[in-house]
Image (tube, grey):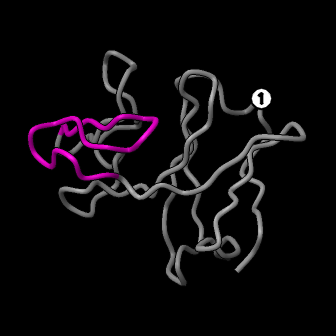
Amino acid sequence: MINRLRACRSDELREGAYLKLEVIFSGEPASLILVRFQERCFAYLNRCVHMARPLDGEEDAILDHTGKYLRCSMHGIVFDPVTGESMSTLCRGERLTAVKVSENDGAIWIKDRRIGERPV
């Protein structure tokens, strides 16, 4: 595994936007989402807790219409963007799988031991 993986330049991820990355997570290919919310960056596996489907699988969007919650486009389940916790009755208390991320040196970095090199 690697110590850190450069995701993008800081200015490439604006407030309320998200970026999808294909990586190796715990030895398997996986999709991550990075989102900037309240001027901070958060990263999660791009997988709904209700069913293992991508959060952006039905639409090219990750935040709900209010811009306050991450939203599964297939199921409509909403999640707190800071904690990844489900705010919907269905799956209440369950959490998206968080991935450690940091922002420094003008870039956003994935800093999680479970992440390997990007797949070829």
Name the side, left or right, on which 23 lies relative to 108: left
Q: How dense is the environment of label 1, judged by Cα within 10 Å: few (below 14), some, or many (20 and up)?
A: few
The residue under label 1 is which amino acid type?
Answer: Asp
Q: Nearer the viewer, residue 57 or 39?
A: 39
The secondary element bearing badge 1 is classed as helix
Q: Which residue is mark 1?
A: 11
Would you place residue 53 above or below residue 62 in this image? below
Name the side, left or right, on which 92 lies relative to 19: left
Q: Main secondary structure of the magenta part?
A: loop
Name the side, left or right, on which 109 lies relative to 45: right
Q: Nearer the viewer, residue 55 or 112?
A: 112
Name the side, left or right, on which 43 lies relative to 10: left
Q: Residue furthest right?
A: 105
Q: Which residues are magenta?
A: 76-95
Tell me where residue 103 appears, x and y as whole percent.
76, 41
Tell me where residue 26 appears, x and y as whole percent.
52, 79
Residue 68 falls in image quadrant: top left
